[in-house]
Image (cartoon, coloured by chain):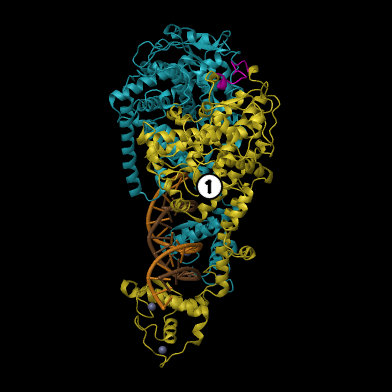
Chain colours: A yellow, B cyan, C brown, D orange
Amino acid sequence: MTGDYTPGWDTTRVLATWSKRARDVNYSSQRSEFAKQPSVKRILKQANFDHYLTPSATHPVTGRVALLTLSFLAHALGDTAHEVSTVRPPGVPCTHLLLVAVWYMMSKDAYYQYRAEDTGSVDGLGLPSLPNTSYWYDAHSSMGSSLYPVTSAQDYVIQNNESQLPISESYREPMDWWAENDVSAPRNLTGNLCSIGGVDQGYLSTDDLMCGPSEFEPAGPAMGMLGNGFVGPAPGPGGEREYVSPMEDMATDESLTPSPQSLPEDSAFASPARKGAASDTRRPSPVQEQSAKEQKKQKKEPKEKVKESKKCGVCGDTARSMHFGGMACDSCKAFFRRSVQSGAYKSFQCPENENCPISKQNRKVCQYCRFKKSQENGMEISWVMSETDRMVLWKNRLAKQRQEQEDKLKDVAYGGLPHTLDPDDADTLRNLAALQEATFKSIPYPEDCYGDNVETLANLFVCICKKLGLFFYRVEDFQYLCKTDQSLLLKNGIGMGIYLHGAYMFDHENERWPAEGNKEALMIPPVSLDTLRKFTVFPEAFE
Amino acid sequence: MTGDYTPGWDTTRVLATWSKRARDVNYSSQRSEFAKQPSVKRILKQANFDHYLTPSATHPVTGRVALLTLSFLAHALGDTAHEVSTVRPPGVPCTHLLLVAVWYMMSKDAYYQYRAEDTGSVDGLGLPSLPNTSYWYDAHSSMGSSLYPVTSAQDYVIQNNESQLPISESYREPMDWWAENDVSAPRNLTGNLCSIGGVDQGYLSTDDLMCGPSEFEPAGPAMGMLGNGFVGPAPGPGGEREYVSPMEDMATDESLTPSPQSLPEDSAFASPARKGAASDTRRPSPVQEQSAKEQKKQKKEPKEKVKESKKCGVCGDTARSMHFGGMACDSCKAFFRRSVQSGAYKSFQCPENENCPISKQNRKVCQYCRFKKSQENGMEISWVMSETDRMVLWKNRLAKQRQEQEDKLKDVAYGGLPHTLDPDDADTLRNLAALQEATFKSIPYPEDCYGDNVETLANLFVCICKKLGLFFYRVEDFQYLCKTDQSLLLKNGIGMGIYLHGAYMFDHENERWPAEGNKEALMIPPVSLDTLRKFTVFPEAFE
DNA sequence: TTAGGTTCACCGTGTTCA
DNA sequence: TGAACACGGTGAACCTAA
Ligand SMILES: [Zn+2]
Ligand SMILES: [Zn+2]
Ligand SMILES: [Zn+2]
Ligand SMILES: [Zn+2]
C-alpha cells in the first residue's frame, strides 16, 4: 500500500540545501547588520521588528518561554519556513502558503523516509497500527451526509467557471459544489491532472478537515453552518480575476514596480571603492591643515564661552558646528557648498567696494563679500566635495541601495522564493504556490463567513480548513498515499497551515484580519481581534 | 451527555486571576526595563532572554516571523502557561507538566464555555456534528485488539504491583498491562477513586493517544515495537519503588536521585570546556609578542613618568593602555577596530603622499595615514576579534548570564508555583502536578526506549504519549466528558503536552535530553539531539 | 588593572523641498 | 535660499573577562 512511494522531486535535497543556505544568509546578514548597525534597537526599527516587541514578547519570562516553545516549533517548521518568510514582500501573494506546502512536503517525506528505514510497513513494527482504511471516513460514514467522495479522478475533476457565481447562488451540497467549482489549472505540481491513483475509496468530510486545527478546538464542534449560503463567492476586487499563472502575474506586476530612474546597473556596480572615497580621504593639504589647526585653536579658546563658539563666523547667526573648516551657520554652509560645487563663486561680483558688511539680515545682498568672508572665516574650497567625490559617494550609496532593491526584486521575481534556490526547486515550489492560490480561489468564502462575530468566525475557520485540505489533497503525490497516511498528513498540515495562515494574515497595525498588501487578503472576510477574543475563554491572553 | 458538566474547581476564575496577575507583572517590569535600559539587548540580557538569541532568533526577519507565529502560539497557551513557567527552577519537578495540566484545563473549559454560550449542544448550531459515540473507538473497534476498555471503574482500577516486573518480563497486551500496572493513589484530584461516571462505553487505544503529537508525526506510524519488550518496566531506580504520595515523594525522592545507570552521563554534563580555547585563537605571534613586550618595557620604564607612557603612539593623545599591540588612545583604538572589523582599511586612500602627520587635531583627516601609523605603532590587525570570535564571545557571555539567572530563580522556588498564587489554586495545581508525577512514574520507560537511536526514540515517543494520555485520563473531571469530548481533548492535550515536555526537558547546554535538575529527568531515557536529527528529513533545522 | 567589545550621542558631509 | 533630513564616521563612556 505504501511501498512504492517515489516523490516527484528530491525533497530532502531541496530542503537540506535550502536550509543550509538559509542559515548562511542568516548568519551573514546577521554579521553585516552587527558590523554596520551596532544598535540592536536600530536594527529592529529598520526591520519593522519593533512592533512585535510587545510586553509579552520582551518580558523576561514570557519572552523566554516564548522562544523556548518557539525553538520547538522551529523544529517542526524548520529553517526553511524562516527562509521562505525572509522574502515575503507585502505584494507577493501566497508566500505564506508556501510555508504550508513546504511543511507538507516535509512531513510527508519525513514520514516516508522513516518508514523506509524500517521494515517498510507499519505493521511490521508490531504496533497496533491504524487500519488501512482510515477511520476518518469509517467514523463518519454512518452519518452519510456531507462527505466528499473523491473516488476517482472523474469525481475530482473540474470545470473552471463557477467561481464567478453571484453571492445569491442557491445552496448546493458542498460535495457537488466542490467537485464542480474547481479551477482548471494548475492542478498539480507537474501540471498533470490529479488522479486518485491506487486509492480505492476516498472520502473526506468536513470533519476530517477540521481535525487539524486543534488549536482552535473550541471552534471545532461549533463550526459550520454548512447548510446556509455556503456557496457564495467572495466579494472584493480580487474575486473577479481569472486565474493567472503566478509567473505571468509576477512579470506584469513587476513592470510597474521598479522606477526606471533607479540608476543603470553598470553605474551601480562599477564603483569598487565604497568607503575610501568618502568624505575624509581627500582631506586638506598641509596648508589647510594649518588653517584647520588654527580653527581649532580659535574655536577652542572661546569654547568656554559657548555663546561665542556657536556663532557663525560669517553672518553671526547661530551655528551648530564647524563646516568646511570654519564655524558657520546652516545657511552659510549651504551657500558656501553651493557656490563651490557650481563654481559660481568664480563669477561673484561685488556691487560695492568688496567690503560689504555681512549680517544675518543682509547676507543675501552681496554674494561676493559673503563668500570672501567665508574664506576668511577659515572655510576651505577644497573641503567641499568635488564632483568626483560626490560621484563616488553617490555611487556607493546607490550601489548599496541598489543591492537591497535588487535583492528585493529578485525575491519578487522568484515569487517570494529565495533566489539562492535551485531553479528546479524553485519551480516546484512555485507550482505548489500556484496550486495553492488557485485552490484557495476556487472555494469562495461563503456568505456566512462575513459579519465579524463569533459565529461567522467559526464558519470562516471551517472554510479555511476546507481550502487547506483541498490544497493538500491536490498535491499530486498526496494521491499515492493510503488513506491512513493521508489523514495523518491532513491533520498535521491543516493544523499548522491554519496557524501560519492566520499569523501571516494578521494586520497587527489595526488588530484585525486580514492584513493588506496581499492579493488573497482582498477576499478574506474581515475579522477583528476582538471577535477572536470572544472566541476564547481567555481574553486576557491577548496582551 | 454534555449538559451536566460541573468542574471540580473554578477553573475560569483561577485562570483569569492568574493571567491578570501575570500581565500586571509583565507590564510593570516591562515598563521599568524600558525606562531604565534603553538598550533592547540589555533588557534581553538581563531578562535571561538572550540565551535564545540565536542568529535566527535575532535576525530581523526570521525573528519577526518567529514572534509572529509565537503570538499565535501564545494565544493557544495563554499567559497562564507563561506565568507557570516563570518559576521553573531547575530543581523543582513537574513544573513543565503543570503547563500541561493548565492547558488541559483551559481547553476543556474553553470548549465547554463555548458550547454553553450556544444552544448548549453542538447540534443546535446546525453543524454536521460529531457522533456522540466517538469515532475514535468506532474506527478501531474493528480491529478488536489493543484497545483499552475503560467501561467501568472496575476496569480502570488498578492493582499496584506489577511495576516491579523485571525487564525480561514477557510480553503482554498493552491493554492488560496498562490496566494492571497502575498506581493506586492518588487517582484523581480529590483523592477519590476515578470512576467513569456516566460514560457507558469507552475505549482508548494507543492510536488514540498518538493522534495528538502531530508535530512528531514522522514517528507516528513507525513508533512502537510493542511486540518486543514493551512491557518491561524502566530500568531506572524509580521503576522499582512503590508508589508514594507525591507530596511525600518530593521530600524523599531526592535521596536516591542519581540512578547508577544514568550517572555515567553526568560526565558528559560536567565538561563544557568549550570556552577558553576560542578567545585565544587569535593571539599574537611570537614576533608580535616580542614587539608587545617591548612596548610593555617601554611603558614600564617611563612608568614613573606617567606622562610618557600615557601617550598615544599614533596621535599623541593621552592613552590609558595598550591596544591591539600598541599604545593607543581610546579613539585610535576604536578607529583601528572599526577599520579592521568592517574591512574598510583596505580601501583607505591618502589624498597626499602617504606621509601625513597625525596629531590629535588632524587625526580625522587622513584615514590611510592614521591606519598606517597605527600599524607602525605595533597594532596588529590580527588582534582584532573576527566575527566568529565575537560570536563565541557573545555566546559564552550569554550562557553565563543564563546560568546566573537560573540560580536566582532557584531561590524563588515555591513548589514550582508562583507564590502570588491563591493558596487554593495552588493546591489544585499541586494536586494536578502530583497526579501527573505519579502517573508518569507508574508507566516505566520500557527497555526499548533506551539506546539513543531512531528506533528507541520512536518508542520513547510512544511511551510519553501513553503517559500523557493516562494522566489526562485520570484527571477527575475528564471522566464526566463524553467520549467525543474526551478524544478531542486528548488530541489537543497530548500534542501540546509532548511539545512542552520535550521543550522543558531539553538540555540545551549539551544538546540532549533530558535536562538535569529534575527528578523525572533521571528516569527519562537519554536522547541526543543528533538522534532527533536523524528523525527528520531536515537535520539542518537544528541550528 | 588591562584590554578586549559595545553603545550612543554627536558631527559634518550631502540632499530635498517648500 | 535655508530648514530639515539621511547617512556614515567618531570617540567618550561603558561592560566584561582575565
Ligand atoms: Zn552664517
Ligand atoms: Zn560686497
Ligand atoms: Zn590616538
Ligand atoms: Zn595621508
Question: What residue is at 62 percent from the left and 31 percent from the top?
Answer: A108
Please provide percent x and percent y for residue A61: 39, 37
Residue at image mark 1: A238
Please provide percent x and percent y for residue B450: 57, 20
Q: Does residue A133 show up magenta in the picture? A: yes
Whether residue A208 appears in this view of the structure is: yes
Q: What residue occupies the far left of the structure in this picture?
A: B423
Q: Does residue B417 show up magenta in the picture? A: no
Please provide percent x and percent y for residue B387: 55, 50
**Viewport quadrant of the N terminus of chain B:** top left
Position above or below: B181 against A89:
above
* Quarter of the rendered image showing ligand 1: bottom left
Question: What residue is at 51 percent from the left and 38 percent from the top?
Answer: A169
Report the magenta residues as a range: A125-138
Question: What residue is at 43 percent from the left and 6 percent from the top?
Answer: B154
The front one of A485 and A267 is: A485
Amino acid on which the number 1 mark rests in the picture: Gly
Whether residue B312 appears in this view of the structure is: no
